[in-house]
Image: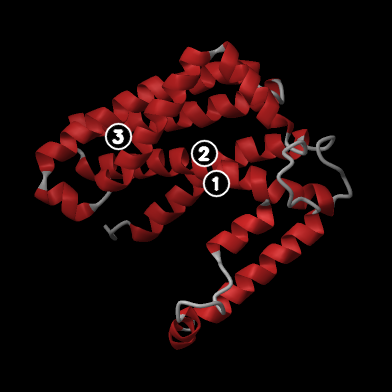
Amino acid sequence: SMEAIFMWVVPPWDEGFGADRWLDLTGLKNRALLMRALATEYVTYTGWGSDDLSPFPLVEWDMWLFSEHWLAFYMHVVFGPVALLIGPLQLWPSFRRSRPVLHRWLGRLYLLCQALSLPAGMYLSRFEYAGLEAMYGFFGMGGTTLACSLMAYRCIRKGDVAQHREWMVRSYWVMWSSVVLFRLAILLWIPFEVRRTGGELPADFRAPYVVCVYLSWSLALLAADVYLSATRPAP
């Protein structure tokens, strides 16, 4: 259940193994107790904390979708995570400086994985649970990531390292948010929002789900540009 997940992440530190004394010394115990309290309040407010996934119709729909379009599914879920794992290493300055040859080869692998994973995901979105609105959102998600990566490739081919880095930051931020924050929003924000507006799951799942599709990549692109503007050296 949702509460059990939080309890596993933030266990009852008062029990055994000397954890209580260690956490008191580091000041982490209060944070652990706060997280447990927030988890309990979330479950109480949203009414979702059981192992029943029926409030999330997307689960059953995706199981059908993946069984019907298994090739696109495997291309999406195999190559996408590889790109996600490569990205942080590529953006690590000391790694780029110390291993430039490996950096270039990993960059090619990053582009290849995106070229296989993202179009597959965009193809799957044609059969999306939430219809055309969500499909266009997923096309924006995959298309924006690919466009940023292609711009990064174009810049490095021209020898413009600074612009190459900026486009790669955009590419990875959009991709990471589209995968990680998108799913966290489905699990955590949608039940909260439906409860706040007086709705019920699964009947009112669709509208906030479509919102998550669009915001997961558009806000990430905005955040990336805010970060780049704040960290860009003055001319």
| Residue at 17%, 32% in the rendered image | 105
| Residue at 43%, 32% in the rendered image | 145
Find disc 3 in the rendering and name its residue: 152
Residue 159 visible, this angle: no
- Quick check: marks 2 and 3 in contact, CB under 8 Å? no
Relative to 22, is 160 above or below?
A: above
In front of the other: label 2 or label 3? 2
Find disc 1 in the rendering and name its residue: 181
Quarter that holds the C terminus: bottom left
- Quick check: marks 1 and 2 in contact, CB under 8 Å? yes
Side of 131 where 164 appears, left or right: left
Residue 179 in the image: state x and y as whole percent: 50, 39
- Quick check: marks 3 and 1 in contact, CB under 8 Å? no
For badge 1, the amino acid type reads Leu
Residue 35 in the image: state x and y as whole percent: 61, 69
Relative to 204, is 39 above or below?
A: below
For badge 3, the amino acid type reads Ala
Side of 168 where 175 appears, left or right: right
Q: Residue furthest front?
A: 16
